[in-house]
Image: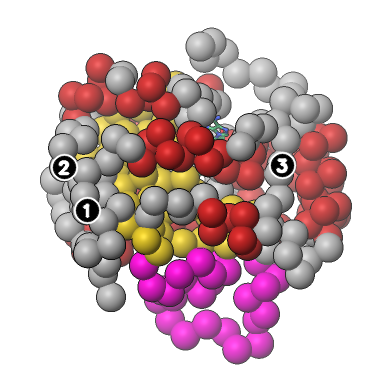
Amino acid sequence: MDLTPDLDTPSPARVYDYFLGGSHNFASDRALAARMEQAMPDIGHIMQANRAFLRRAVRTLVDAGVRQFLDLGSGIPTVGNVHEVARQLAPDTVVAYVDIDPVAVNHSRRLLTDDPRTVVLHADLTQPDTVLDDPALREIIDFEQPVAVLLVGVLHQLTTDPAPTIAHYRDRLAPGSYLALSHASSDRRTDALALRDTYNQGYANTARMTLRTRPQIEQLFAGFTLIPPGLVQLPQWRPDWPVDPDEDPRRFATYCGVGSVDPKVSPA
Ligand SMILES: C[S@@+](CC[C@H](N)C(=O)[O-])C[C@H]1O[C@@H](n2cnc3c(N)ncnc32)[C@H](O)[C@@H]1O
């Protein structure tokens, strides 16, 4: 896959970077971000809540004993990367980052060049065999041991049904492994539809947003057992501090959850 970025066309990775306050975005990305904010003024807040869920999920999974992470759709490195969060608790954690976006991959490789316990793959996550059989990934990840697969903030970007792809990854996972995901939804929030239309026009069909209902997102955990608190809105998943009672969690329009491959392994 070509690693030359097209800076004239916005990319989901760079627009997300913009909303998180990063510096790896360009005029085309910022122009689309402005249009997305018109459609949904608090979209930046939602993206930050998504990133915060990722951090809490990683900490929970390290606490549960996981030392291997497969971060699919990992994005442009920013504050609180998976390996940084995990290694605060377990310095021996290994992480394979996978992204389709050249800027995300180039920047991740630059950051991690001297880190033997990470790999950065430029790959399409919807081709699981390419990812799972990559020799560099196999050097650090042992699928006989528990692995946490992260699909955070990415599945609504896929143009194909994610279920068969997730099943393919699941079938390779040992007991004690996990899936963590978050997914945008239009439930209770009609401006999510305007956001989706802005997104789809803005990316000129190089990326498309597919919104799913809560039951549809729950089905993506087929073969996994959701651990408490189940499938909830972003700020409700094991918050670090009490959820703001004045903030309606439904405004986040994004469900998230963590599922275990083995129902016996379920951190309280
Ligand atoms: C919104 S970012 C999420 C980043 C990170 N997971 C997080 O939640 O903070 C979504 C990422 O998924 C990547 N992506 C989208 N489709 C992909 C695909 N088919 N294969 C690999 N990566 C993909 C995008 O390039 C982007 O970097």
* Disc 2 residue type (three-letter): Gln
The residue where tag 3 is placed is: 209
- Where in the figure is residue 61, as x and y percent of width and height? 28, 58
Question: SS at mark 2?
Answer: loop
Whether the residue carrying mark 1 lies under 8 Å from ligand 1 is answered with: no
Relative image position of residue 102 (x, y in whole percent)? 53, 22
Query: Which numbered circle lies on residue 145?
Result: 2
For image coordinates 66% across by 18% down, the residue present is 6
* Helix, strand or loop for disc 1: loop
Task: Please tell me how crowded label 3 is: few (under 14), some (14-19), or many (20+) other residues with Cα within 10 Å.
Answer: many
Q: Please, is residue 5 above or below residue 254 in the view?
A: above
Instruction: Determine contact: label 2, label 1, CB under 8 Å.
Output: yes
The residue to which callout 1 is attached is 176
Q: Earlier in the sequence, mark 2 or mark 3?
A: 2
Distance (Cα) linking label 2 and label 3: 34 Å
- Tell whether label 3 touches label 1 (CB within 8 Å): no
| Residue 201 on image: x %, y % | 84, 35
| Label 2 environment density (alpha carbons within 10 Å; few <14, some 14–19, many ≥20) | some
Is residue 67 visible in the rendered image? The answer is: yes
- Judged by depth in the image, the label closer to the viewer, 2 or 3, is 2
Mark 3 belongs to which amino acid?
A: Met
Q: Is residue 36 magenta?
A: no
Q: Looking at the picture, which amino acid does disc 1 mark?
A: Gly
Q: Earlier in the sequence, mark 2 or mark 1?
A: 2
Nearest to the observer: residue 63 or residue 102: 63
Report, in whole angstroms, how far the alpha carbon at label 1 lies from the one at label 3. Answer: 32 Å
- Note whether residue 58 is visible: no
Q: Is residue 51 left or right of residue 135?
A: right
Residue sitting nearer the eye, 243 or 221: 221
Please report the residue visible at 38 percent of the width from the left and 22 percent of the height from the top.
Answer: 129
Range covered by the magenta-colored residues:
227-252
What is the x, y in percent for residue 45?
64, 63
